[in-house]
Amino acid sequence: MNLIFLKVLKEISKVKKENISKLMVSFSDPFRLEIIELMMDGEVCVCDIMKLTKLSQSRISYHIKILKEAGLISDRQEGRWVYYSLNKESLFLIKEWITSLTDDSSKRKRCCE
């Protein structure tokens, strides 16, 4: 392989690891997990999240901000309402990464071979 191609692959891998790191941080809070689970059935707005979680609007906004920055959720505005939904591309990235971990870890390698 040529050096330019290897350099591009290395950069892609670095970006992918940074994205996965942000995604994992977004999964590290129980309230964010609850918000994510609410989105499994489709779009939700903050008022829906407030009703179902009993969290304040400001606390929900904080968690939504983290989820958006990680790329785990996306939003769309309709009139004065904002609807949030899961970003499937990010979920597939996590799935790919976990699959590669499990596939690669099943390959036994002997030390010093």
Image: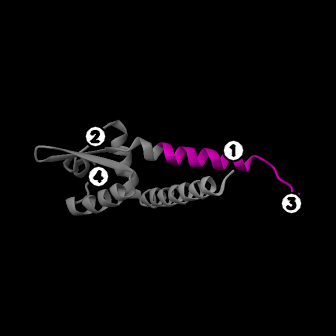
Q: CA distance from mark 3 to mark 4?
A: 50 Å
**Where residue 79 sits: x, y (%)?**
10, 43
- On the image, numbered disc 2 is attached to which residue? 43
Which dot, 3 or 2, sits closer to the camera? Answer: 3
Mark 1: amino acid: Asp
Residue sitting at x 31%, y 43%:
85
In terms of depth relative to the viewer, which is nearer, 12 or 91? 12
Q: Looking at this rendering, what residue extends furthest in the right direction?
A: 113
Q: CA distance from mark 1 to mark 4?
A: 37 Å
Q: Earlier in the sequence, mark 3 or mark 4?
A: 4
Depicted 56 relative to depicted 96: above or below: below
Q: CA distance from mark 1 to mark 3?
A: 19 Å
* Numbered range of the magenta stretch: 92-113
Depicted 43 relative to depicted 111: above or below: above
Binning the other alpha carbons within 10 Å of mark 2 as few (below 14), some (14 to 19) or many (20 upward) gives some
- On the image, numbered disc 3 is attached to which residue? 111
- On the image, numbered disc 4 is attached to which residue? 53
Q: Quadrant of residue 38?
A: top left
Depicted 30 relative to depicted 86: above or below: below
Q: Could you tell me which secondary element the residue under label 4 belongs to?
A: helix
Dot label at residue 13 = none
Q: Earlier in the sequence, mark 3 or mark 2?
A: 2
Q: Earlier in the sequence, mark 1 or mark 2?
A: 2
- On the image, numbered disc 1 is attached to which residue? 103
